[in-house]
Amino acid sequence: MSKVSTKTQEPKFTPYEPKKGEEYMSDAQLEHFRSILTNWKTQLLDEANRTKDYIQDESSALPDINDRATQEEEFALTLRTRDRERKLVRKIDKSLSEIDEGDYGFCELCGVEIGLRRLEARPTATQCIDCKTLSEMKEKQAHANM
Protein backbone atom coordinates (compact mmCIF):
# COMPACT_ATOMS: atom_id res chain seq x y z
CA MET A 1 0.00 0.00 0.00
CA SER A 2 0.98 3.66 -0.20
CA LYS A 3 4.07 4.90 1.58
CA VAL A 4 2.93 8.49 1.02
CA SER A 5 0.21 10.13 3.09
CA THR A 6 -2.97 11.20 1.34
CA LYS A 7 -4.32 13.05 4.40
CA THR A 8 -3.69 16.77 4.72
CA GLN A 9 -2.24 17.44 8.16
CA GLU A 10 -3.40 20.44 10.14
CA PRO A 11 -0.65 22.53 11.69
CA LYS A 12 0.33 21.75 15.29
CA PHE A 13 0.84 24.67 17.66
CA THR A 14 0.24 25.92 21.17
CA PRO A 15 -2.91 28.06 21.32
CA TYR A 16 -2.20 31.77 21.74
CA GLU A 17 -3.13 33.28 25.08
CA PRO A 18 -3.59 37.05 24.71
CA LYS A 19 -2.24 39.28 27.44
CA LYS A 20 -4.72 41.34 29.43
CA GLY A 21 -5.60 44.42 27.39
CA GLU A 22 -3.62 43.20 24.35
CA GLU A 23 -4.84 44.68 21.08
CA TYR A 24 -6.30 42.30 18.48
CA MET A 25 -3.71 41.29 15.87
CA SER A 26 -0.81 42.63 17.89
CA ASP A 27 2.71 41.95 16.65
CA ALA A 28 2.90 38.86 18.88
CA GLN A 29 -0.39 37.51 17.50
CA LEU A 30 0.69 38.17 13.92
CA GLU A 31 3.96 36.36 14.59
CA HIS A 32 2.02 33.43 16.09
CA PHE A 33 -0.06 33.10 12.91
CA ARG A 34 2.92 33.68 10.62
CA SER A 35 4.64 30.78 12.37
CA ILE A 36 1.59 28.51 12.03
CA LEU A 37 1.18 29.35 8.34
CA THR A 38 4.88 29.06 7.50
CA ASN A 39 5.22 25.70 9.28
CA TRP A 40 2.08 24.39 7.58
CA LYS A 41 3.34 25.49 4.15
CA THR A 42 6.71 23.84 4.76
CA GLN A 43 4.96 20.63 5.81
CA LEU A 44 2.80 20.62 2.66
CA LEU A 45 5.76 21.30 0.36
CA ASP A 46 7.81 18.55 2.04
CA GLU A 47 4.95 16.11 1.51
CA ALA A 48 4.72 17.13 -2.16
CA ASN A 49 8.44 16.40 -2.58
CA ARG A 50 8.06 13.02 -0.89
CA THR A 51 5.19 12.22 -3.25
CA LYS A 52 7.23 13.19 -6.30
CA ASP A 53 10.15 11.02 -5.14
CA TYR A 54 7.83 8.13 -4.30
CA ILE A 55 6.12 8.16 -7.69
CA GLN A 56 9.46 8.39 -9.49
CA ASP A 57 10.86 5.49 -7.44
CA GLU A 58 7.76 3.31 -7.70
CA SER A 59 6.89 3.95 -11.35
CA SER A 60 8.40 0.72 -12.54
CA ALA A 61 6.50 -1.23 -15.14
CA LEU A 62 4.85 -3.96 -13.12
CA PRO A 63 4.36 -7.18 -15.09
CA ASP A 64 0.89 -7.90 -13.71
CA ILE A 65 -1.89 -5.75 -15.17
CA ASN A 66 -3.81 -5.77 -11.88
CA ASP A 67 -0.77 -4.59 -9.95
CA ARG A 68 -0.26 -1.79 -12.48
CA ALA A 69 -3.91 -0.74 -12.21
CA THR A 70 -3.72 -0.69 -8.41
CA GLN A 71 -0.53 1.36 -8.52
CA GLU A 72 -2.01 3.85 -11.01
CA GLU A 73 -5.13 4.28 -8.86
CA GLU A 74 -2.94 4.86 -5.80
CA PHE A 75 -0.92 7.47 -7.70
CA ALA A 76 -4.12 9.18 -8.91
CA LEU A 77 -5.50 9.40 -5.36
CA THR A 78 -2.22 10.77 -4.04
CA LEU A 79 -1.99 13.33 -6.84
CA ARG A 80 -5.57 14.53 -6.21
CA THR A 81 -4.64 15.07 -2.57
CA ARG A 82 -1.50 16.98 -3.56
CA ASP A 83 -3.55 19.14 -5.95
CA ARG A 84 -5.85 20.14 -3.07
CA GLU A 85 -2.76 20.89 -1.00
CA ARG A 86 -1.31 23.00 -3.84
CA LYS A 87 -4.46 25.14 -3.69
CA LEU A 88 -4.08 25.31 0.09
CA VAL A 89 -0.49 26.56 -0.30
CA ARG A 90 -1.86 29.43 -2.41
CA LYS A 91 -4.32 30.29 0.38
CA ILE A 92 -1.47 30.16 2.90
CA ASP A 93 0.58 32.52 0.71
CA LYS A 94 -2.42 34.88 0.52
CA SER A 95 -2.73 34.82 4.33
CA LEU A 96 0.99 35.52 4.73
CA SER A 97 0.60 38.50 2.37
CA GLU A 98 -2.35 39.73 4.44
CA ILE A 99 -0.14 39.58 7.55
CA ASP A 100 2.49 41.70 5.75
CA GLU A 101 -0.17 44.18 4.59
CA GLY A 102 -1.90 44.42 7.99
CA ASP A 103 -5.18 42.92 6.76
CA TYR A 104 -4.91 39.49 8.39
CA GLY A 105 -7.54 38.53 10.92
CA PHE A 106 -10.30 40.79 9.64
CA CYS A 107 -13.33 39.70 7.61
CA GLU A 108 -12.96 40.55 3.93
CA LEU A 109 -16.71 41.22 3.68
CA CYS A 110 -17.64 43.24 6.77
CA GLY A 111 -14.26 44.13 8.29
CA VAL A 112 -14.89 42.77 11.80
CA GLU A 113 -12.39 40.64 13.71
CA ILE A 114 -12.40 36.99 12.64
CA GLY A 115 -11.17 35.94 16.09
CA LEU A 116 -8.10 34.15 17.40
CA ARG A 117 -9.73 30.75 17.96
CA ARG A 118 -11.37 30.71 14.53
CA LEU A 119 -8.05 31.60 12.92
CA GLU A 120 -6.28 28.90 14.90
CA ALA A 121 -8.90 26.40 13.71
CA ARG A 122 -8.64 27.67 10.12
CA PRO A 123 -5.55 29.89 9.69
CA THR A 124 -6.52 30.78 6.10
CA ALA A 125 -10.02 32.01 7.05
CA THR A 126 -10.98 35.26 5.33
CA GLN A 127 -14.48 35.71 6.73
CA CYS A 128 -15.93 36.06 10.20
CA ILE A 129 -18.23 33.24 11.30
CA ASP A 130 -21.39 35.28 10.61
CA CYS A 131 -20.44 36.16 7.02
CA LYS A 132 -19.21 32.62 6.35
CA THR A 133 -22.45 31.12 7.69
CA LEU A 134 -24.52 33.51 5.57
CA SER A 135 -22.39 32.75 2.51
CA GLU A 136 -22.85 28.99 3.01
CA MET A 137 -26.62 29.42 3.44
CA LYS A 138 -26.82 31.39 0.18
CA GLU A 139 -24.72 28.75 -1.59
CA LYS A 140 -26.92 25.95 -0.26
CA GLN A 141 -30.03 27.85 -1.38
CA ALA A 142 -28.58 28.41 -4.86
CA HIS A 143 -27.87 24.69 -5.23
CA ALA A 144 -31.35 23.80 -4.03
CA ASN A 145 -32.89 26.07 -6.69
CA MET A 146 -30.96 24.46 -9.55
Image (tube, rainbow, N blue to C red):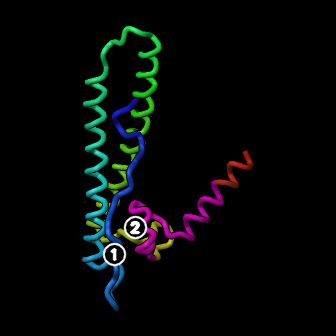
Examine the residues drawn in magenta and state their main secondary structure. helix
Query: Looking at the picture, how far across and down is residue 123, in whole percent?
Result: 39, 62
Query: Looking at the picture, how far across and down is residue 24, in whole percent?
Result: 36, 81
Mark 1: which secondary structure? loop
Give the residue number, with chain letter if any, for mark 2.
120
Q: CA distance from mark 1 to mark 2?
A: 8 Å
Quadrant of the image for the C terminus?
top right
Residue occupying image coordinates x 45% and y 32%: 77
Residue 138 part of the magenta-drawn span = yes
Q: Is residue 111 above or below residue 39?
A: below
Q: Residue flagged by tag 2: what amino acid is it?
A: Glu
Q: Is residue 6 above or below residue 42?
A: above
Mark 2: which secondary structure? helix
Magenta segment, which residues?
Answer: 113-139
Give the residue number, with chain letter if any, for mark 1.
16
Query: Looking at the picture, how far across and down is residue 111, in whole percent?
Result: 46, 74
Residue occupying image coordinates x 45% and y 72%: 114
Residue occupying image coordinates x 61% and y 59%: 136
